[in-house]
Amino acid sequence: MDILRLALLSLAAGIAIILGASFLFDAGRGAKETPPPRVAAPQNQDNSGEAELRAARAKIEARIALAAPDYMRFFSRLKALMPHEYGTILDGFARQALEGVDMSNVDLLLSEAVRILRLSDGASAAKADGPALSRIFAMQLTMMRALAANNPKLCVAFLYGGASQAFFEFSSQNRALVADMAIAGLEAIDDGRFQKIERPPPSDADFALLENALKAKQLTEPEIAALLDGKTPAPPIPDERMCRVGQTYLETLAELPEPARLRIYGLAVELMARS
């Protein structure tokens, strides 16, 4: 098995919600004067401090619910599936607020929650059952289609994990879609924590199957190399075409026989969680 090819494949196919969706907000972080929130370690507090923490947390929860009901769907699902993690994340946000950090940007709050879960539990999603794991990639395709209709250049950047201010603006204007992505990843993590399905890595035969399927969809050798090997063709592939190629790529992955498809999905997600 070509490990380099697999690593590139994971970047092209593994920009997965809970595992990688926070890249959508990276440029937005850079545009803010306030540093991004970070969850602080728990500290001993007296009753007065605990009351202040609860009040600050309640204020943040109310702000999310009011400003971004779609994001609140994610946080509500997180609370239901992983109450301990939810409490840790929200208490961390509250401590930051008490320290004077501006916690009013709900897009950054979602991004930070995604980042924390990716680092702590992201690899669990690779052990989810077929439907939960497949939904991650189905949501990637949905995102690519939305980006294609908005800006093919952003669509191509998403395929390769790029980040820009334009991504930040797009995500803040499409919160329902971003929330759906985050929820799909969250549910895959939760499923994987219980299912614990161990899958072997994809084989050379799996890659050959994928390449042949892409050729059957009329993708050229340079287009396939751009997807699987990270090669930049000369001349470059126009954004409109590369965006369509990326969508075809995800569509083709979804059509592979289940064993091969889930092996590719599983390792792509695992590599993204460790990146």
Image: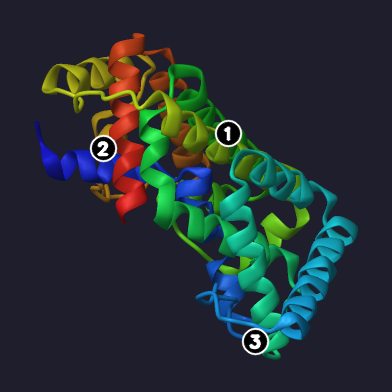
Q: What element carries label 3?
A: loop
The reply to whether residue 229 is in sight is no
Labels 3 and 2: the sequence-earlier one: 3
Q: In this view, does 175 lie to the left or right of 87?
A: right
Q: In this view, does 109 lie to the left or right of 73?
A: left
Q: Residue visible at 70% across and 75% down?
A: 94
- Disc 2 marks a residue whose amino acid type is Leu
- Disc 1 marks a residue whose amino acid type is Met
Give me the C-alpha separation between circle 3 and circle 2: 38 Å
Q: Mark 1 points at which residue?
A: 139
Looking at this rendering, what residue extends furthest in the front direction?
47
Image quarter of residue 34:
bottom right
Near mark 2 (Cα within 10 A), the count class, few <14, some 14-19 or many ≥20, is many
Q: Nearer the viewer, mark 3 or mark 1?
A: 3
Looking at this rendering, what residue extends furthest in the right direction?
66
Q: Nearer the viewer, mark 2 or mark 1?
A: 1
Q: What element carries label 2?
A: helix
Q: Mark 3 points at which residue?
A: 34
Q: Which of marks 3 and 2 is in front?
A: 3
Q: In which quarter of the image is the C terminus?
A: bottom left
Give me the C-alpha separation between circle 2 and circle 1: 20 Å
Q: Is mark 1 on a helix, strand or loop?
A: helix
Q: Residue visible at 19% across and 24% down?
A: 200
Q: Is residue 119 left or right of residue 31?
A: left
Q: Mark 2 points at which residue?
A: 228
Labels 2 and 1: the sequence-earlier one: 1
